[in-house]
Image: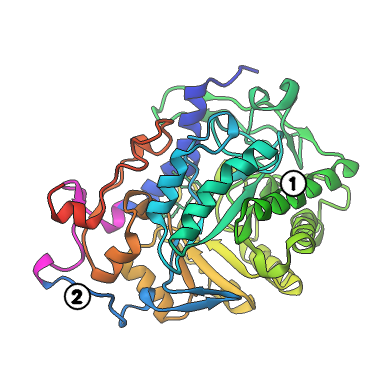
Amino acid sequence: MAHVTFNSLRSFSFLYSLHSLYNATTLRHFHFKSNQIQPSHPPHMAAPATSDQSNPLITPYKMGKFNLSHRVVLAPLTRQRSYNNVPQPHAVLYYSQRASNGGLLIAEATGVSDTAQGYPNTPGIWTKEQVEAWKPIVDAVHAKGGIFFSQIWHVGRVSNSAYQPNGQAPVSSTDKPLSPQIRSNGIDQVHHTPPRRLSTDDIPRIVDDFRLAARNAMEAGFDGVEIHGAHGYLLEQFMKDKVNDRTDEYGGSLENRCRFPLEVVEAVVNEIGADRVGIRLSPFAEYAECGDSNPKQLGLYMVNALNKSGILYCHMVEPRIGSVAENVECHHSLVPMRKAFNGSFIGAGGYDREDGMKAIAENRADLVAYGRWFLANPDLPKRFALNAPLNKYNRETFYDSDPVLGYTDYPFLDEVSNGV
Ligand SMILES: Cc1cc2nc3c(=O)[nH]c(=O)nc-3n(C[C@H](O)[C@H](O)[C@H](O)COP(=O)(O)O)c2cc1C
């Protein structure tokens, strides 16, 4: 099996994280004509200079013990600028730019152990050095009154032996490899190392890695953790029946397939308390060849089980963010899961301002997470409050490793209006 180069994995991560998103949603909503996106009505009718209380996105919300001043959440966004898996000082500026008083930020996916990684320069939270490196970043968000959750992940088979300790195979629910993926240039292929199927006895160790990562996140000062149970990574590799081919108590029935993710939730809840725990799920998505034959049933099973643990929030990705080739039109909806879940519900995926306002007004979500728009607009809540134009995002720099480019160099609204 060929080793994956830095560049090919970067493109691969682009392929998985983004290619489908572009096809799926963005082009539907906006015309890219200049550096800025025009709002849905002309600038001369633009919004008031102060926050508009008739905008449901800009209304307070109490999420457990956290008093949020608005509903615009920073979605977790992998940035690949944490060299050697250690968060860097430049992340202080990046996250504090996006912090607002009473605003919820979810940090980029962060590895729970040295077997959890699958991309270059993504951060971890399993060593003392990593925990110490997170501290000033968290402090900077808190200094601006922000609420900051760490998204903790394990990529499972979406990895390569080059990212694994001692060059070992990545681990998964299965030993089925991912098929070679076509890079975004449409020509080259990317290979992942075939995974090693975790034995039944191995699983408690991985559960414990999540528990320790959650404890470390508390030590770093985060307000809570979001368990990454989405997008084809390890937890989904157990949950979804197109990947999980196990015959032990972690495979087969829905109950068995959800056992590992729910054990992770239980361990994290026991460690830091349910009032600090969220989870991200994408039952309808098919990233990394990770699909389920009955995603609605899976989503409902999970939220009902999560109700028993009493976790703070469930963050669910819209069905319209499906897979690379999927059409944007989708008859599925998150509403059944939203209705069944007792905690706070965050919707994400393909939202613009109007969509988000509507979702809150129609009670389809308590909060809306924005990925690409927040990446390109550090003051997104303010822009939504004012109905101001948005900076266009540059996908070419999403996964750049530069400490500034496409990271902390997107202008704030006042810089734009002052011609800076
Ligand atoms: C550059 C980039 C990195 C991402 N990294 C993560 C991640 O670390 N964890 C995660 O759960 N989702 C990740 N996503 C998905 C986003 O959180 C979000 O769900 C997706 O961009 C769709 O929302 P949007 O239409 O508002 O951008 C990423 C997306 C992008 C564009």
The circle drawn on residue 375 is: none
Q: Is residue 108 visible?
A: no
**Residue located at (25% from left, 51% from top):** 391
Q: Is residue 405 above or below residue 294?
A: above
Dots 2 and 1: beta carbons under 8 Å? Answer: no
Rendering coords of residue 372 (x, y %): 38, 51
Rendering coords of residue 78 (x, y %): 50, 43
Along the horizontal axis of the image, is 129 left or right of 400? Answer: right
Q: Is residue 87 above or below residue 326?
A: above
The answer to whether residue 176 is magenta is: no
Q: Which residue is mark 1?
A: 244
Q: Which residue is mark 2?
A: 48
Dominant secondary structure of the residues highlighted in magenta in the image: loop
- Amino acid type at circle 1 is Asn
Rendering coords of residue 183 (x, y %): 45, 29
Closest to the observer, 348 or 270: 270
**Residue located at (58% from left, 39% from top):** 123
**Span shown in magenta:** 27-44
* Total labels drawn: 2
**Which is nearer the N-term, disc 2 or disc 1?**
2
- Numbered disc in front, either 2 or 1: 2
Q: Secondary structure at mark 2?
A: loop
The answer to whether residue 34 is magenta is: yes
- Quadrant showing the N terminus: top right
How far is disc 2 from disc 1 in space, using C-alphas? 52 Å
- Amino acid type at circle 2 is Pro
Q: Is residue 331 visible?
A: yes
